[in-house]
Image: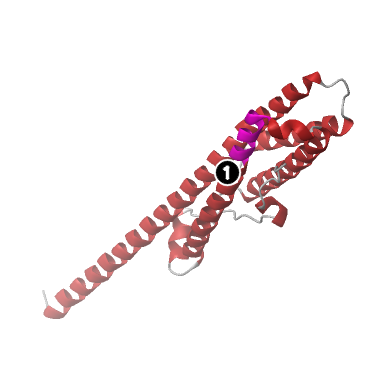
Amino acid sequence: MKKQTIILIVFVVAILCGGGCVGCSQYNGLVTAEQTVDKAWADVQTQYQRRFDLIPNLVETVKGYATHEQETFENVTRARAGLTDAYNTADSLRNAAAPADMAAFEKYNASQAELNRAFNVYVNAVKEAYPDLKANEQFLSLQDQLEGTENRIATYRGYYTEAVQTYNLKVKRFPGNIFAGLFGFEQKAQFEAEAQAQSAPKVQF
């Protein structure tokens, strides 16, 4: 075999091996970034679940405290109905929400913002109707836990935002966009949070 042919073969093999290494590196980088996004979203969901668990407990505490009241406070009743509707809507959407489904993700995010708003309305109505509830230790404990949960939600949403930003850049930038297209990596949904949704419920009495 001629020397030139051998050199050509070695050159082609080197290019193929180099391309394979680049391909593996890009693919593994996309997988890692996607796993980071999924982990960050799972953390956000964990805090949403904590909120789901705490709100009914706080509502039941208020209802128990108010059993001695002879008068039905219309504002509290109406606010509780609005909170229940918002809670049920958010709860019904959470299993369908995923970073890969932008429409479902945005709809779920909007339902969480509405739940936060309805909770604020409810607590303000309770504040006006039952000013002495501030002495109830169980209510105060749940209030503190909800405040802590809202702070953690904001923190983990921040982690999620950073993870999605890193992942989406890998998907869009060259040469990652080539491998993303080949292996089916698509952009993930990003939070478009309203200013109101970023703030914790104002439940101080």
**Is residue 24 visible to the viewer in this orientation of the structure?**
yes
- Horizontally, residue 145 falls left or right of residue 174, namely right
Colour convention of the picture? secondary structure
Residue 44 location, quadrant: top right
Magenta stretch in the rendered image: 136-146
Camera-side residue: 21 or 62? 62
Residue 98 location, quadrant: top right
- Horizontally, residue 113 falls left or right of residue 49, namely right
In the image, is residue 114 part of the stretch drawn in magenta? Answer: no
Against 16, residue 200 (above or below) is above
Residue 134: % across, % down: 71, 35
Camera-side residue: 110 or 9? 110
- Which residue shows up at 54% across the image and 52% down it? 155
Kind of residue sitting beneath label 1: Gly
**Is residue 85 visible to the viewer in this orientation of the structure?**
no
- Which residue shows up at 56% across the image and 41% down it? 47
Task: Provide the residue designation for mark 1.
Answer: 148
Residue 149: % across, % down: 58, 42
